[in-house]
Amino acid sequence: EAIRAAGGVAEGFRGDVTSEEAMEAALKQVGARFGKLNVLVNNAGILSPRKAWNAWTQDEIRKFVDINFFGYWITAKYAYPLLKKVENPRIVNIASTAGQRGYAYVSAYVAAKHGVIGLTRSLALETAGKGVTVNAVCPGYTETDIVRDAVANIVAKTGRTEDQARAELAARNPQKRLVRPDEVADAVRPGGVQHVPRGDHVVGDERRLAQGADLGMAHHQHVGAGQRLLPRAGLRQVG
């Protein structure tokens, strides 16, 4: 509604990121309607329940990997032909700080998000010759349904209050607060990074993001104008 109110065109296409056939069909519908695709944002994800790594069954692990990792791969695969039809196409994978570090008792989620970072870097190298920019955004704990579910889980298992549980998660972010969804959106939209206030939960180049970079949004880092993120195993503070 907001897009339409601003004069844009907004349409929905049903898909299932765990099904290659469903995503192929969905992207064909996009192609039939618009003929091209400028930006793909992979954002499907679910958070795993908290339990020890050796309590997981293979089927349980597969469910989270199918959605949080393979879903990104499959969607990019069928979006790619449409992306190649435009200038400066972009793929942005919404990963997580769980793709850059470990978190206890959510090993399936962490493993999948590490996979997303690896996939991002590999896709960036393979698609660079076609002019496709591929990056990942790695938010910390963010005000989403996933975090609300995590809070409810903490309350149920520990007896803490909801406020205490939220504070526990927020304390793991540098500014001791949860990231807002609009801050993640600002990092994703073309040209949007420079509009995020300096010092907020974002890492980004004020011009164009380098191929294969993972933008950590809970590391309280900022890349200044004219400096570029490079594909690397970790991020360093640059001014």
Image (cartoon, helix red, strand yellow):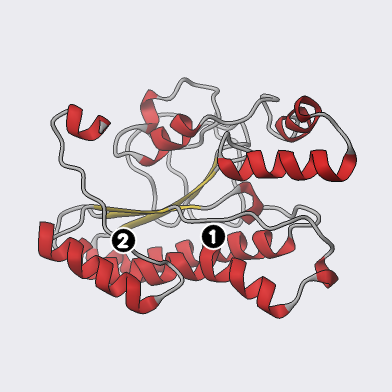
Residue at (18%, 27%) from the top-left corner? 6
Q: Amino acid at mark 2?
A: Arg
Quadrant for residue 207, please give it: top left
| Pointer 2 residue | 14
Q: Looking at the image, which is closer to me, 2 or 195?
A: 2
Closer to the observer: label 2 or label 1? 2
Residue at (25%, 66%) from the top-left corner? 27
Residue 205 makes an appearance in the image: no
Q: Quadrant of the N terminus?
A: top left
Q: Quadrant of the C terminus?
A: top right
| Pointer 1 residue | 117
Question: What distance separates the C-alpha of mark 2 from that of mark 1?
Answer: 26 Å
Residue 121 makes an appearance in the image: yes
Where is residue 215 shown, x and y percent of the image? 51, 44
Residue at (42%, 67%) from the top-left corner? 17
Residue at (63%, 47%) from the top-left corner? 97
